[in-house]
């Protein structure tokens, strides 16, 4: 059966020995008992524990004859798990023979070894395969990674520009940044940094730049930070829409519950990702977390579209009470909130496509994964530019952009008018409060 070679493993072997099926409970800690595993080929489930380096160490400790993975995703093993150890050094990580039985071929293999006549296994290495380069033969995958890297760099530049606009007033004096924009300007760059590092590792560094643990964390953690940013923008939109209305306990309770749910989901997701990165062991099936994130994304998208439309109507009803600068800021926020909602639907669509192709096409799955990253990055850019600070000295250098030009010509230092909207509730929102 076809099996990928490990780039820094044993690529030349022929082994014939009895086999031992490792119990599921021993997978969690990569444990092998000396008595049943010694001088045998151990069968381990790739879906339960796929770190080849840890199984190699365990095998060597009890003098087993080799390691055979079942339920292995061969394409993933070629392009990802064959590098499940740090590749900064050319030193082989093990001499233990390791082979992988593909997920689609595992049922037939298990039926064969279930026979009473099956007492020995013969495993042998195949031709050397510099597996990581297979992605370069699929232009869609290669260019999708490059696009993600470019978008991440653009996102970081945009965040830096927005941060300086919020940080400096018209005379280059440092001013306080409102809470919600500060949260967004912290989370979105953080997401872009992890996403960009992962894209760099997968392209320029040929997946040899970081450890397996960091790679596992970076490939998914970035999306969790984006979801927290969605929560922050949702709160700002809600506060600005209800600022002129009498306080409502039910509305406040609903928003609090929603944000608390998102926070708990984020903490649980981060905890399992960090533990997985440290132990290289999957603690849980992330399908359920992914489903919850998808539902949150769809709900937030609907809310953004509705809130954006209501904010626009509210502006029309109070147009005569607003200064030109204040109106420009609020119009920008309402437009970007609504646009963020539509971008959220794009994100949801890519997540659904990922689920559809999860077990059918590796090339399509990989391409869609990077499309998801691009969608998150673009949605994050909308969040970053949704907030418009009062005039900053930085704006005079942004004449090429409507983000700067809408604020030029006046510092708009007039006092906030007592009208519906976030300016009458500085402590509650701050997205257009004086800073």
Image (tube, grey):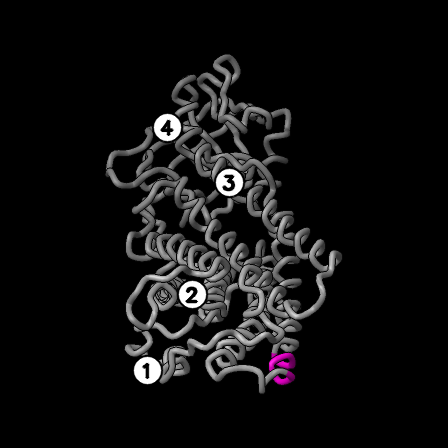
In terms of secondary structure, where does tag 3 sit? strand
Q: Which mark is residue 91?
A: none
Q: Which residue is mark 3?
A: 101
Earlier sequence position, callout 2 versus callout 4: 4
Residue 435 x, y percent position in the rendering: 42, 65
Q: Residue furthest top?
A: 35
**Disc 1 versus disc 2: nearer the observer:** 2
Q: Can residue 138 be seen at all in this image of the molecule? A: no
* Cα distance between the residues tagged 3 and 2: 61 Å
Q: Which mark is residue 96?
A: 4
Q: CA distance from mark 1 to mark 2?
A: 24 Å
In three-dimensional space, the C-alpha distance between marks 2 and 4, rounded to whole angstroms, equals 63 Å
Residue for point 52% across, 81% down? 327
Does the magenta segment cover residue 100? no
Determine if residue 120 is in view. Answer: yes
Please provide the residue range marked out in magenta. 312-317
Front-lying residue, 324 or 225: 324
Looking at the image, which is closer to me, 364 or 301?
301
Say which quarter of the image contains residue 204: bottom left
Residues under numbered marks 2 and 4 in contact, where contact means CB atoms less than 8 Å apart: no
Residue 106: quadrant of the picture: top right
């Amino acid at each position: 059966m076809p099996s990928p070679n490990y780039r820094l493993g044993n690529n030349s072997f022929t082994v014939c020995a009895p086999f031992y099926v490792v119990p599921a409970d021993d997978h969690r800690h990569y444990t092998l008992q000396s008595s049943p595993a010694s001088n045998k080929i151990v069968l381990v489930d790739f879906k339960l524990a796929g770190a080849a380096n840890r199984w190699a160490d365990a095998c060597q400790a009890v003098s087993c004859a080799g390691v055979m993975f079942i339920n292995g995703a061969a394409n993933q093993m070629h392009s990802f798990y064959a590098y499940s150890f740090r590749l900064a050094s050319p030193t082989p990580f093990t001499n233990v023979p390791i082979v992988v039985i593909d997920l689609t071929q595992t049922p037939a293999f298990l039926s064969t070894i279930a026979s009473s006549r099956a007492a020995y296994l013969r495993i042998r290495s195949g031709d050397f395969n510099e597996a990581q380069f297979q992605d370069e033969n699929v232009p869609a995958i290669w260019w999708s990674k490059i696009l993600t890297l470019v978008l991440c760099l653009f996102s970081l530049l945009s965040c830096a520009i927005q941060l300086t606009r919020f940080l400096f007033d018209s005379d280059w004096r440092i001013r306080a940044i409102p809470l919600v924009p500060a949260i967004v300007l912290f989370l979105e760059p953080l997401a872009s940094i992890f996403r960009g590092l992962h894209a760099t590792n997968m392209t320029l560094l040929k997946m040899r730049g970081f450890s397996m643990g960091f790679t596992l964390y970076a490939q998914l953690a970035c999306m969790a930070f984006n979801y927290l940013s969605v929560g922050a923008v949702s709160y700002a939109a809600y506060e600005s829409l209800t600022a002129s209305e009498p306080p409502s306990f039910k509305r406040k309770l609903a928003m609090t519950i929603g944000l608390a749910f998102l926070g708990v989901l984020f903490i649980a997701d981060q905890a399992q990702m960090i533990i997985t990165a440290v132990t290289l062991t999957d603690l849980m099936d992330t399908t359920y977390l992914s489903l919850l994130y998808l539902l949150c994304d769809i709900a937030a998208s609907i809310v953004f579209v509705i809130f954006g439309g209501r904010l626009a109507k509210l502006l029309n009803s109070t147009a005569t009470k607003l200064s030109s600068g204040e109106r420009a800021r609020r119009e920008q926020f309402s437009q970007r909130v609504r646009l963020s909602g539509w971008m959220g639907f794009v994100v949801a669509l890519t997540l659904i496509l990922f689920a559809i192709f999860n077990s059918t096409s590796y090339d399509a799955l990989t391409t869609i994964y990077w499309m998801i990253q691009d969608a998150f990055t673009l949605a994050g850019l909308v969040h970053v530019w949704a907030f418009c600070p009062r005039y900053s000295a930085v704006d005079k250098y942004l004449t090429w952009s409507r983000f700067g030009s809408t604020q030029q010509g006046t510092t708009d230092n007039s006092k906030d008018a007592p009208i519906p909207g976030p300016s009458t509730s500085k402590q509650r929102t701050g997205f257009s409060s004086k800073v």
